[in-house]
């Protein structure tokens, strides 16, 4: 029985490590920008700001970028299809 518990713990740890690594791999293929780059683009017709914070994180925050649209959970694919390739989509959370 003790061996069974240990195997479950090891499996969970390996799963977490695997998923974390996959997230970093995906994030590495996405362009990022710093706040100064974003400030320079604010007001541009080609810029679309998408706030990706969930539920209470979004509603309770006093920090929201003017003009940003809230993106609902799992709305990434819809957002990608809704805007043309000429748009710069900025996904952010704070």
Image (tube, rainbow, N blue to C red):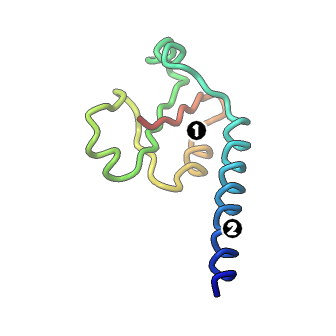
Crowding near pointer 2: few (<14 within 10 Å), some, many (20+)?
few
Assign the N terminus to one quadrant of the image: bottom right
Q: Which mark is drawn over residue 13?
A: none
Q: Is residue 5 above or below residue 34?
A: below
Q: Which quadrant would residue 61 be assigned to in this image?
A: top left
Quarter of the C terminus within the rendering: top left
Which residue sits at x=71%, y=43%? 26
Foreground of the two, 17 or 79: 17
Residue at the spot of label 1: 83
How far across and how far down the image is residue 79, in percent?
Answer: 55, 45
Instruction: Give whichever of discs 2 and 1 has the lower sequence position.
Output: 2
Q: Residue at x 58, y 22 (%)?
A: 33
User: Residue under circle 2?
Assistant: 10
Q: CB of mark 2 within 8 Å of CB of mark 1? A: no
Residue 14 position within the rendered picture, expressed as x and y whole percent measured from the top left: 71, 61
Vertical relation: 50 (above or below) 67: below
- Quadrant in the rendering for residue 18: bottom right
């Amino acid at each position: 029985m003790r061996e069974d518990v240990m195997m479950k713990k090891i499996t969970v740890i390996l799963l977490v490590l695997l998923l974390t690594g996959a997230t970093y791999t995906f994030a590495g293929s996405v362009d990022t920008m710093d706040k100064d780059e974003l400030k320079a683009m604010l007001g541009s017709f080609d810029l679309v700001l998408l706030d990706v914070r969930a539920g209470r994180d979004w509603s309770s925050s006093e920090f929201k970028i003017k003009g940003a649209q809230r993106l609902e959970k799992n709305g990434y694919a819809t957002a990608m299809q809704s805007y043309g390739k000429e748009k710069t989509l900025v996904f952010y959370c704070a």
